[in-house]
Amino acid sequence: MAGKFDGRVAIVTAGGSGIGAATARRFAQEGASVVIADLSGKRAEEVTTGITASGGKAVCIKMNAADPEGVQATIQLALDTYGRLDIMFNNAGLAEMAPLDETSLESWNHVLAVTLTSTFLGMKYCLPIMRKQGKGAIVNTASISGKGGDYGLSSYNAAKAGVINLTRSAAIENAKHNIRINCVCPGAINTRAAQILGKERADEFRRLQAVAHPLGRMGEPEEIANTVLFLASDDASFITGVEITVDGGVTAHTGLPDMLRLQK
Ligand SMILES: NC(=O)c1ccc[n+]([C@@H]2O[C@H](COP(=O)([O-])OP(=O)(O)OC[C@H]3O[C@@H](n4cnc5c(N)ncnc54)[C@H](O)[C@@H]3O)[C@@H](O)[C@H]2O)c1
């Protein structure tokens, strides 16, 4: 059976775990050749081996998405191995938790670099290739944390808000080149990042998140992957410059208490 992405080449940054790994697997299942780029060479290799063992096409690279040389080497690997680049999924990002006044400049710079600068670099270096090819699709991972504030995550909130607006400016600049650029805003997703309170408190974190999400649970990485594949596909051919929120209803809620329950 033909896959939706047969003949296309996709790069996935932070592809060694969580949302990136799930998306790399889905791209490969749909026929894409995938470059899995991650700071952890070991994790990237494990995902790649899993894909190739089940008949998919994938290669991997250990890189830092905040480093221009790492991003350029990743794109070069896609071109050297597969001869083209159709899809760039700029997915790297991380949060460091502290109240704003206790956030060190070093931590601020690190979060901004891995979360926002990486997105800038990913787009900057793939655009000339996509323009030459006459077509391309870029998807950036933002977050609902780019649309509102979280306690203790001011640097992450600022960086993800930056990803959303950077997506818009990149989209309008590149629409004339037939390059579509969108972002996805996940709610809390069941990945390694769900261990922000420490491994031993992961269950408690999940329970609290389940209460915060009207659908009553955290999302799964595959549920974000499905949206990324949609945005990267020709099914989204008239969509550019948008953010799609995949959050189990969190941002639909004002934050006020459940009056219906209180009334009982
Ligand atoms: N999990 C969530 O609840 C959630 C919610 C909203 C947005 N996001 C965003 O989704 C993206 C992926 O998060 P996840 O939850 O899948 O995380 P994860 O912790 O499961 O995986 C992150 C991966 O990124 C890699 N990585 C870290 N720094 C890197 C760098 N500088 N260069 C390249 N790779 C690097 C890690 O090695 C790891 O394999 C991030 O941008 C994150 O901010 C996550």
Image: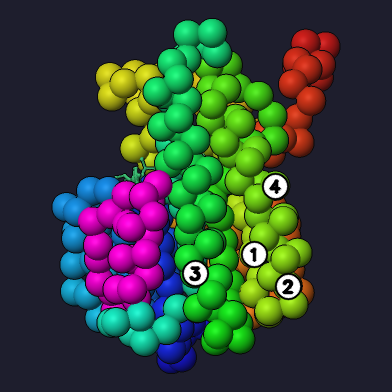
Quadrant containing ligand 1: top left
Q: Amino acid at mark 3?
A: Cys
**Residue shown at 47% from the left, 8% from the top:** 102
Give the image location of residue 118, x and y in percent.
46, 49
Name which of mark 3 and mark 4 comes first in the sequence: 3
Q: Are marks 2 and 1 in contact (CB under 8 Å)?
A: no
Q: Say what secondary structure mark 4 lies in.
A: helix
Which residue is tagged 2? 175
**Residue shown at 38% from the left, 70% from the top:** 75
Name which of mark 1 and mark 4 comes first in the sequence: 4
Q: Say what secondary structure mark 1 lies in.
A: strand
Name which of mark 3 and mark 1 comes first in the sequence: 3
Give the image location of residue 6, x and y in percent.
45, 87
**Residue shown at 55% from the left, 13% from the top:** 100
Which residue is tagged 3? 126
Report which quarter residue 191 is drawn in: top left
Report which quarter residue 105 is drawn in: top left
Q: Amino acid at mark 2?
A: Ala
Give the image location of residue 133, x and y in percent.
54, 86
Q: Say what secondary structure mark 2 lies in.
A: helix
Which residue is tagged 1? 181
- Can the viewer see residue 72 in this picture? yes
* Quarter containing the C terminus: top right
Q: Amino acid at mark 1?
A: Ile
Q: Which residues are magenta?
A: 56-78
Which residue is tagged 4? 165
Q: Under 8 Å from ligand 1: the CB of mark 3? A: no
Side of 48 relative to 233 (left or right) = left
Q: Are marks 2 and 4 in contact (CB under 8 Å)?
A: no
Q: Residues within 10 Å of mark 1 (few under 14, many from 20)?
A: many
Q: Are marks 1 and 4 in contact (CB under 8 Å)?
A: no
Q: Are marks 3 and 4 in contact (CB under 8 Å)?
A: no
